[in-house]
Amino acid sequence: MGACSGDIDVEPAGTGNDSETDADTRASADAGTANPSTGPGADASDTAAPGCAADETCVLIPEGFVGPIALARNDVELPALGCQGAYPEPGFRLSNGIDSGDEASCTCACGPLVRTPQCEPPVLSAFDPALGCNEFPVLDAWDRLQRCGPLGSEPPAGAIYGIGPTPMDGECEAVLVDAQIPTASFATEWTVCMPAAPTTCDIGTCVPPAPPGFDELLCIYSADQTAECPEEFPSWVTGYTGLDDTRTCNDVCQCRTTGFCHWTAELGDCDSPGLLVEECTPGLDVAGVTHATFFGPTLGDPECTAKNGPKGPAGEVTETGATRLCCQLPPAPE
């Protein structure tokens, strides 16, 4: 296993995606250099320890750690390498990176109205005739008038009067037409194998060399992700035991009503027929006008449209079950 520090994903054996990822993403060291006399490349005659075979190294594995374990990267085009030799017991699978698959999407449609649209209150405005209707600045404005309500100020003579449409606020049925949420997996995997019964030696455990096809550098692991790695296994990575995919299209679709409410108004004194004001009404003689009445609304054709365009799913993919792995460093060059 190449040396690195960082996060590597872990997954139970037999699950996940064997997608190929550069092996250099695996552990890189941020600690010192291992003693070549105890590294996997040392001569067997120099590393033999009491109680261990000639090709094994005696290593103290701290309390709270399990190991050693051997790692083999899985080629996506070939079957995963099986556990063998001094490491015959299958363990879990190391994985690197989350592969969420193709882009997830939720396709929504809007059904019929489920609530009658409500209209925002109208505003009666007096516009400068030199500028035209709906052009600012407004000479005067009145809103929320009851039937024959007092204006409170004298309407400007010669102004253009208008009472524009107001937005409607309705509620439409939202329908989920299609949900495309690809299965999440890990991008790259390694097979993890363990000794059947590690042999003890004078200071700890006999560590046999990795089987053919496995990384030469061995590791130990702990369920405590804050555990401090021992000197013999100084390069650490954080692994994970699975994925939690909470992505869903449920409750993602939202629809709104678009359209306008149309109003009219009468300007007068409450005792005689008033002057009719629509969206843009010039040439009114407003002398003596003191009150106004709003009439309406008349609903335009309401349309139901999806809010905010196409939607992605709610939720995310996260790793679960953090595990601390501590790995050997390569021998120092001679």
Image (tube, rainbow, N blue to C red):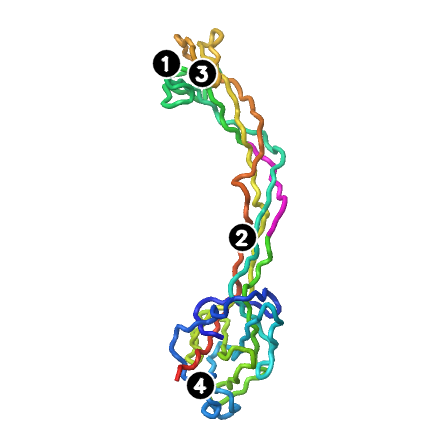
Q: Which residue is mark 3?
A: 149
- Label 2 belongs to which residue? 315
User: Relative to residue 193, is residue 313 depicted above or below?
Assistant: above
The residue under label 4 is 38
**What kind of residue is marked 3?**
Gly
| Residue numbers of the magenta segment | 170-180
| Quadrant location, the C terminus | bottom left
Judging depth in this view, the residue of 263 and 301 nearest the camera is 301
* Residue pointed to by mark 1: 156
- Left or right: 203 with respect to 298? left
Residue at the far top in the pictured view = 272
CA gap between label 1 and label 3 equals 17 Å
Q: Earlier in the sequence, mark 2 or mark 4?
A: 4
For marks 3 and 2 on the same chain, the one whose residue lies earlier in the sequence: 3
Please tell me whether residue 248 belongs to the stretch shown in magenta: no
Does dot 4 land on a helix, a strand or a loop? Answer: loop
Q: Give the mark nearer the N terminus: 1 vs 3.
A: 3
Q: Looking at numbered disc 1 in the image, what kind of residue is underneath it? A: Pro
* Labels 2, 4: front one: 4
Cα distance between the residues tagged 4 and 1: 98 Å
Instruction: Work out whether 146 lies above or below 80.
Output: above
Callout 4: 10 Å neighbours few (<14), some, many (20+)? many
Q: Distance of mark 3 from mark 2, alpha carbons?
A: 52 Å
